[in-house]
């Protein structure tokens, strides 16, 4: 898939942030290159994380037109949920797996959970439902190749597991917030 690296860390130094998205070619992983400079240099000011997230909307929407799903990945407090909610404002609903009822359904019957969701949905904190949800998602994405079906927002550590990342290969574009 496409990997779009982006940094949403606050900086108060005079250093320029530079390009947030970098061209990535990983032939062994089947990655496609994507280059998009989404941040202007900043000198002597704190970077507005909200501005960075607004600038990432375009590249993320581009991924949604080419991939069946997009994962917005990163550590806690990186701005994943904010970015997803901004994108979904005009696009569709957000289901948050911090909601105990949604999480229970996603864990107990991931296929029924995905089947109950409206089109073009985002699932926040998707890693909370574990590998069975991703396997159900893989089945759904393999059955329907329509781009932009899901946005998944979640933890960096979850996607670093080899079995999980292999499950998603070729099916998702990834926006990495650092």
Image: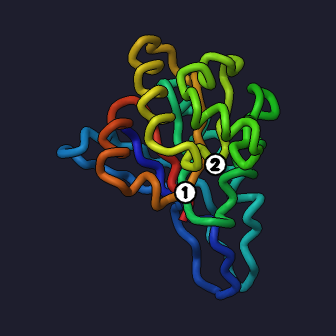
- The quadrant of the image that shows the C terminus is bottom right
Say which residue label 1 marks. 155
- The quadrant of the image that shows the N terminus is top left
Note whether 53 is above or below 41 in the view shown.
above
Residue that appears at 66% across and 23% down: 120
Residue that appears at 74% across and 26% down: 91
Residue that appears at 60% across and 19% down: 112
Instruction: Describe the element under mark 1 as helix, strand or loop.
Output: strand
The percent coordinates of residue 42 (x first, y second) are: 67, 74
**Label 1 near label 2: C-beta < 8 Å?**
yes
Task: Out of 138 and 59, give the one closest to the viewer.
Answer: 138
Note whether 174 is above or below 120 in the view shown.
below
In this view, the residue farthest toward the left is: 28
The percent coordinates of residue 143 (x first, y second) are: 42, 12
Say which residue label 2 marks. 125
Note whether 165 is above or below 156 in the view shown.
above
Gap between marks 2 and 1, in whole Å?
A: 7 Å
Residue that appears at 58% across and 37% down: 107
Task: Out of 70 and 168, give the one closest to the viewer.
Answer: 168
**Residue 15 seen in the figure:** yes
The percent coordinates of residue 172 (x first, y second) are: 44, 34
2 on left or right of 113: left
Instruction: Describe the element under mark 2 as helix, strand or loop.
Output: loop
């Amino acid at each position: 898939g496409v990997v779009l690296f982006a940094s949403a860390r606050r900086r108060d130094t005079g250093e320029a942030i530079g390009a947030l998205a970098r061209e990535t070619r990983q032939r062994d992983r089947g990655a496609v290159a994507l280059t998009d400079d989404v941040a202007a240099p900043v000198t002597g000011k704190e970077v507005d994380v909200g501005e960075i997230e607004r600038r990432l909307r375009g590249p993320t929407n581009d991924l949604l037109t080419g991939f069946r799903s997009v994962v917005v990945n990163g550590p806690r407090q990186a701005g994943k949920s904010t970015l997803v909610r901004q994108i979904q404002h005009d696009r569709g609903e957000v289901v948050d797996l911090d909601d105990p009822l949604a999480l229970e359904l996603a864990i107990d019957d991931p296929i029924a959970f995905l089947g109950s969701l409206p089109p073009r949905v985002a699932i926040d904190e998707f890693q909370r439902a574990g590998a069975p949800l991703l396997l159900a998602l893989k089945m759904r994405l393999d059955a329907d190749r329509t781009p932009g079906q899901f946005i998944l927002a979640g933890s960096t550590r979850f996607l670093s597991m080899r079995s999980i990342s292999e499950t998603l290969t070729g099916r998702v574009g990834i926006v990495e917030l650092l």
